Amino acid sequence: STGSMIYNLYVFSKNGKCIFYQEWNVQRPPPENRGEDQALLFGLLKALTSFVSKASPTECETFQSFETSTYKLHFFEAGTGVKFVINTDPKTLNMQAALKKIYSDMFVEYVIKNPLYSLLEPVKCSAFESSLDKYIKPVSYTHLTLPT
Amino acid sequence: MAIYSVYIINKAGSLIYQKDFVRLHNDLTSNDYLRMAGIFHGVYAIASRLSPVSEKSSGLLELEAETIKLRCFQSVTGTKFVVIADPKQQNLDIFLSEVYELYADYILKNPFYELEQ
């Protein structure tokens, strides 16, 4: 792809709680109630996966991405039910490999394997945050693509 | 051409036309289809609201999953035309504008048609 603008990342626990949020290039003023926005997003993910599973000719329980005129949302659900959402500019092609990498190389490594962390709690893990930043920041507004 | 389904949804979110061209994984009742139209109508609007960019965003235009690709066109009057197809299917935007033309020619120009039915 010819360049990527990465806006933000959400991580949801299996039961819908937003346990991590990071933004790099969000151009909108922050919402009055961030929790409400996060709940709305989780509801959207649930509604879309339900819609897709009904509309599909073969078994399909999830989707990869959707786009509007201003952004593209990429979605990945891990086997444990943890859900990752990353928003980019609409032209960015495929972030599935990047999301899987964020899950396995960073989230599993620094969060799940951390004996002090419980899966339903907000993630406050500097190792996870800094590895994520190191991965995303160099390409978040550039002509490079994420290495996978 | 691997088109699976077409939905036409009015500006209030009600389903005004639906057809499947293939057998779906689950058999759906007409209530299921009505619900899906309502869900999509809501999803379309929420997608616009969740934009991380400050400019006015459109609603959900295209969706990709492993087994389907979805594309939506909203006319200036707020009617949504939704097509669900094989993920490799190209030119769904052209397909939808052709559906819109047929809708305009046969439905809207029919003097006996009650709007939004």
Image (cartoon, coloured by chain):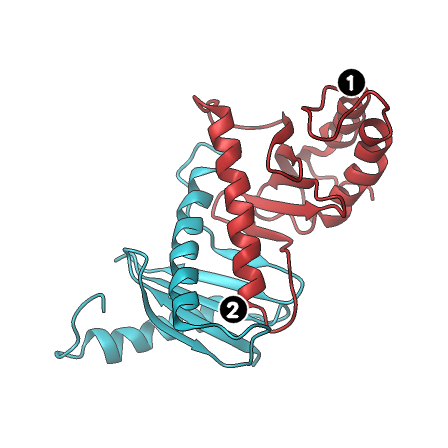
Chain colours: A red, B cyan
Q: Is residue A61 above or below residue B50?
A: below
Quarter of the figure with residue A130: top right
Q: Residue at x 42, y 38 (%)?
A: B49
Is B52 positioned to the left or the right of B8 in the image? right
Q: Nearer the viewer, residue A22 or A109?
A: A109
| Residue A41 percent coordinates (x, y) | 52, 39
Residue holding disc 2: B84
2 and 1 marks in contact (CB < 8 Å): no
- The amino acid at mark 1 is Ser
Residue found at x 78% / y 39%: A103
Q: Position of residue A86 (x, y in %)?
A: 64, 39
Q: Is residue B4 above or below residue A127?
A: below
What amino acid type should be assigned to the residue bearing mark 2?
Ile
For the residues labelled 2 and 1, the Cα–Cα distance comes to 42 Å
How would you rate the neighbour count of disc 2 (Cα within 10 Å): few for under 14, some for 14-19, many for 20 or more? many
Residue at the (27%, 55%) spot, across then down: B12
Residue that label 1 marks: A126
Above or below for B40 versus A140: below
| Residue at disc 2, secondary structure | strand
Query: Can the viewer see residue B70?
Result: yes
Q: Secondary structure at mark 1?
A: helix
Chain letter of the residue carrying label 2: B
